Image (spheres, grey):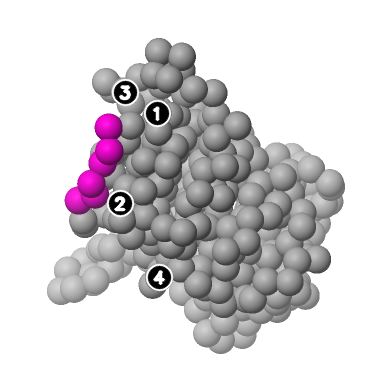
Amino acid sequence: MLREAYPGAEITWIINPEFAPLLRGNPDVNHVHFFPRGEFRGLGAPKSLLPWLTKTRQIRPDLALDFQGLLRSALIGKISGANEIYGMSDAREGSRWFYDRIAKVNRSGHAVNRYLKLAECAGATIGESLRCPIPTGDQLPRFDEYPPFILLHPFARGSGKSLSNAVIEEFCRALAPTRVVVVGQSRHKIDTPENCVDLTNQTSLLQLIRLIRVARFVVSVDSGPMHIAAAVHDRLLSIHTWTDPLRVGPYKPDAWIWKNGHLLRVSELETARIRRRGRRFRRKDIPAVAELIRPLVPVDPMLA
């Protein structure tokens, strides 16, 4: 939307290096500037930080937009030498002191709507549809994308978000003989039934995107990969424990939500009466999820 508002602008995205593949081939971004957060720790931090500061000061944009809304991101805007810095009204850690203009946002509204308000504050026109130029992704070597499969992403950094090994195993069994491909980062080995393909710790971000695109259905806990899936298609079930799907759930209305034992479409969330805190996803919740997914994923007749 910013590109459409300013077709001749030079747009630079400051991003952690590990997430930069998300911008591969993006026609709206001219430059990528890395923020190598991991290098700014320990005794070697000054050696890494000083060259980064020098390079960041050379950006000198007319406008910096702080979509993260934290002290660190506001400081980066200041270091860049921006003529003006815009941010959101719900920014934290004192970052609002750095802003020249503040977009008034609904603190309890969806994150995407909050970001759109900031883009609008910068001159963008907000339409009904969103264009999300996510890369096509990279194919995995020695992985056959046929027969059809369900993609399960059961891991997240937040406390209580991840699914237990027992739930993962039972989930695979409930959907047999359909293949279930498990992806994500985990320190623990999972037990895999015959119809389960364990790809944990084995995919790059671009390979994960490819799997999300070709999967017949995606089941994910509240996480970054879930939002990638929501940007790509609506064949998605997002599992929320303590997080509020109205604020951080999938943005597409036809995607599915699990919260506190309830299964419903995103479009039904505002009228549904569900406790905000909720509980963990348990084995007893699997049959309802399997019943939802099974008609949507064809079974290879050779496996039936």
- Mark 2: few/some/many CA within 10 Å (<14, 14-19, 20+): some
**Residue 195 appears in the picture as rendered:** yes
Q: Which residue is mark 1?
A: 177
Q: Is residue 209 above or below residue 146?
A: below
**Residue type, label 3:** Phe
Secondary structure state at the residue bearing disc 3? loop
- Seen at 74% across and 49% down, the residue is 253
- Mark 1: few/some/many CA within 10 Å (<14, 14-19, 20+): some
Report, in whole angstroms, how far the alpha carbon at label 4 lies from the one at label 1. 29 Å
Q: Are marks 1 and 2 in contact (CB under 8 Å)?
A: no
- Seen at 31% across and 23% down, the residue is 143
Q: Residue 92: x and y, percent?
A: 57, 82
Q: How many marks?
A: 4
> Could you tell which of marks 3 and 1 lies nearer the N-terminus?
3
Q: Which residues are magenta?
A: 189-194
Q: Residue furthest top?
A: 302
- Seen at 40% across and 46% down, the residue is 171
Report, in whole angstroms, how far the alpha carbon at label 4 lies from the one at label 2. 15 Å
Q: Which residue is mark 4?
A: 160
Asked whether residue 37 is drawn in magenta, I would say no
Please tell me whether the stretch drawn in magenta is mainly helix, strand or loop.
Answer: loop
- Residue 185's label in the rendered image is 2
